[in-house]
């Protein structure tokens, strides 16, 4: 069992949540409530990482943030190291790959709030911020939680983007799923088996929690 | 007492055509009445600040809420309106009490709970304060929505089809409750409805809306003077509406005597009627005209008056005759042939005959 790989995986999952969820709430809510020109295109772009092969996503990230690109050079001058093959690069890649997993459930969650309910909150004298905190977030909360859990689980299992952008540096960018591949290449079936079982348990637990949550919500609104 | 007169001007060509102008004084109930899809709800939303028409002016007392010509548009949370939504729009994650407390943000925190409880008691919802909306019946939800709207201590109360989602028995009780409530509130009350019953029971004034355009407005008696408003004729049938008081009930004969601005009317007696104020509607097609006092008829109601107007219907053989009886007006729908035969003319004295069972009586207050 590669404990440092488990550590990198968990840190990556938590980091992705911290980066992605607040932004996802803002953006999902925007897509749910606002109508604007080009919304269809934006929604399609949000979904792209879902259908794109992870290696393609990884390739473009490397091109965009590579040492020869202006963005990559800017990052290098600020952080002192290049973005690819670092944990920061991994985090950025993971966040981008998970955009649809966060935005879509949250968008549906906000869309499910009837307009009259939001209007009623305004007529009750609640300011936009009070409406958001006291009415919208509590009603969209199950969706936000589902999005967070799905994203966390998905991050643990991410392989293609991680390998392309992060490589396989122990303690820095080697996640559990990369470590499994690494161990199998070295004919270390036992270690690979333990790590695979760990990921399996986490995946099953995640699904159980989300199913329970969605059941409880549908009961409460029945 | 602050000035709480509500005055509204809304004009816009598209996407929802609007052309209305009205005002409502505290204590008055303005029924916005019209077919579905005529823009009634949009008018309420514009008053509440949930909709911004192209040209609008909404004033509550001395405050300007909307004035598009001056660039004034107060957001809804800055307007003191109580709005009861058609489907109630309760907050599903909060109890009845929590729903009402949400609208009490202007009160000190320590007072809110007590205040919310007393409001729920006011709408007769004492037992189910901790229930969530999905555990409540339609009538109970409506009461929570009403308590929540009142919690805001609004300068105007807006009701959007408040009885559409409850059955007839509940509807009747809620109408009574709102009616007694509005007598204690010194604010204008706007009621959107497509049901004439609601308007007759609750309204003091009416605004008739067709395709977003106000086609008639004024006191309830506007209905008697405007046979040209097509929607009223189709939805309600032409008729005259006025207020009366039950002066006596003759249980033996099964009749009640009503005193109104034009004299006395007899209607079938009902329990609990004696001394009550009522609103009376006499359908125009139920009024028979005679040029002299009739004899040997079973009728109780013979009202003597003079013809104030004769309106010939261009598209039919019917003629609407408007008769002044005392201070009130009656409408009678007769054929063109009858007008010719009786040689009816303006200022002529006629007898209007009405069967007692044809008179629709709504109690507006208890004895």
Image (tube, coloured by chain):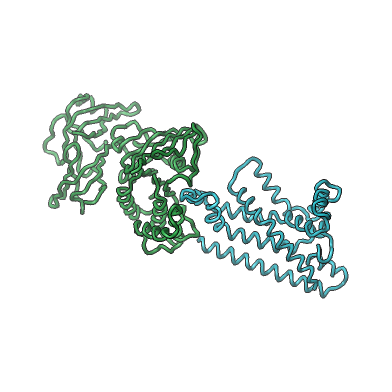
Chain colours: A cyan, B green
| As drawn, B96 above or below B337 | below
**Left or right of A92 on screen, residue A213:** left
Query: Is residue B234 at least partly visible in the picture?
Result: no
Residue B129 visible, this orientation: yes
Q: How many marks?
A: 0
The image quarter in which residue A105 lies:
bottom right
Q: Nearer the viewer, residue B200 or A148?
A: A148
Q: Residue furthest bottom?
A: A190
Dividing the picture into quarters, in which one does residue B112 lie? bottom left
| Image quarter in which the N terminus of chain B is found | top left
Instruction: Tell me which residue sits at (21%, 42%) in the image.
Output: B244
Q: Residue A8 vs residue B64: left or right?
A: right
Above or below, B348 against B177 in this view is above
In percent of the image, x 72 and y 70: which residue is there? Answer: A200
> Is residue A92 depicted above or below B156 in this figure?
below
Image location of residue A183, percent across then percent down: 84, 70
Residue B83, percent from left and from top:
43, 48
Identify the residue at horizontal 60%, vertical 49% (top origin): A32
Going 66% across and 57% down the picture, which residue do you hit? A21
- Residue B174: x and y in percent read 34, 53
Q: Residue furthest left?
A: B296
Front residue (pair B38, A70)? A70
Q: Is residue B112 left or right of residue A173?
A: left
Percent of width and height locating residue A71: 80, 47
Q: What residue occupies the far right of the structure in this picture?
A: A186
């Amino acid at each position: 069992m590669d404990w440092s790989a488990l550590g990198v995986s968990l840190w990556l999952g938590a980091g992705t949540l911290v980066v992605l969820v607040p932004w996802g709430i803002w953006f999902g809510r925007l897509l749910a409530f606002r109508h604007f020109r080009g919304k269809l295109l934006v929604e399609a772009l949000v979904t792209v990482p879902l259908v794109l092969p992870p290696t393609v996503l990884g390739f473009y990230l490397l091109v965009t943030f590579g040492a020869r690109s202006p963005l990559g050079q800017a990052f290098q001058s600020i952080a002192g190291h290049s973005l690819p093959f670092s944990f920061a690069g991994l985090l950025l890649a993971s966040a981008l790959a998970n955009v649809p997993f966060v935005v879509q459930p949250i968008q549906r969650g906000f869309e499910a709030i009837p307009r009259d309910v939001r209007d009623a909150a305004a007529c009750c004298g609640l300011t936009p911020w009070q409406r958001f905190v006291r009415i919208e977030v509590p009603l969209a909360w199950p969706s936000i939680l589902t999005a967070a859990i799905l994203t966390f689980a998905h991050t643990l299992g991410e392989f293609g983007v991680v390998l392309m952008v992060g490589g396989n540096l122990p303690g820095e960018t080697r996640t559990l799923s990369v470590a499994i591949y690494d161990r199998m290449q070295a004919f270390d079936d036992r270690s690979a088996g333990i790590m695979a079982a760990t990921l399996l348990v986490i995946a099953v637990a995640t699904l159980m929690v989300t199913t329970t949550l969605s059941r409880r919500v549908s009961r409460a609104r029945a | 007492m602050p000035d709480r007169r509500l005055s509204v001007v809304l004009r816009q060509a598209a996407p929802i055509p609007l052309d209305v102008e009205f005002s409502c004084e505290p204590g008055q109930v303005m029924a916005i009445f019209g077919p579905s899809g005529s823009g009634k709800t949009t008018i309420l939303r514009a008053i509440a600040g949930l909709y911004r028409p192209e040209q609008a002016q909404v004033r509550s007392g001395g405050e300007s809420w909307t004035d598009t010509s001056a660039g004034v548009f107060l957001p809804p949370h800055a307007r003191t309106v109580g709005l009861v939504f058609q489907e109630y729009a309760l907050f599903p994650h909060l109890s009845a009490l929590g729903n009402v407390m949400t609208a009490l943000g202007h009160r000190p925190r320590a007072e809110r709970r007590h205040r919310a409880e007393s409001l729920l008691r006011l709408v007769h919802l004492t037992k189910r304060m901790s229930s969530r909306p999905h555990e409540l019946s339609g009538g109970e939800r409506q009461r929570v929505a009403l308590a929540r709207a009142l919690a805001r201590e609004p300068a105007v109360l807006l009701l959007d089809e408040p009885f559409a989602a409850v059955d007839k028995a509940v509807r009747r009780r809620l109408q009574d409750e709102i009616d007694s409530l509005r007598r204690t509130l010194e604010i204008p009350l706007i009621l959107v409805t497509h049901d004439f019953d609601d308007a007759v029971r609750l309204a003091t004034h009416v605004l008739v809306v067709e395709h977003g355009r106000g086609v008639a407005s004024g006191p309830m008696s506007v209905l008697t003077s405007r046979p040209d408003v097509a929607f009223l004729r189709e939805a309600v049938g032409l008729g005259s509406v006025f207020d009366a008081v039950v002066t006596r009930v003759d249980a033996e004969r099964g009749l009640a005597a009503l005193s109104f601005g034009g004299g006395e009317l007899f209607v079938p007696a009902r329990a609990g009627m004696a001394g009550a104020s009522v609103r009376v509607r006499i359908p125009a097609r139920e009024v028979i005209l005679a040029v002299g006092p009739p004899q040997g008829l079973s009728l109780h109601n013979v009202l003597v008056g003079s013809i104030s107007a004769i309106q010939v219907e261009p598209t039919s053989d019917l003629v609407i005759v408007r008769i002044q009886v005392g201070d009130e007006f009656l409408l009678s729908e007769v054929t063109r042939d009858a007008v010719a035969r009786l040689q009816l003319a303006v200022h002529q004295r006629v007898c209007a005959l009405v069967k007692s069972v044809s008179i629709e009586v709504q109690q507006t207050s208890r004895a």
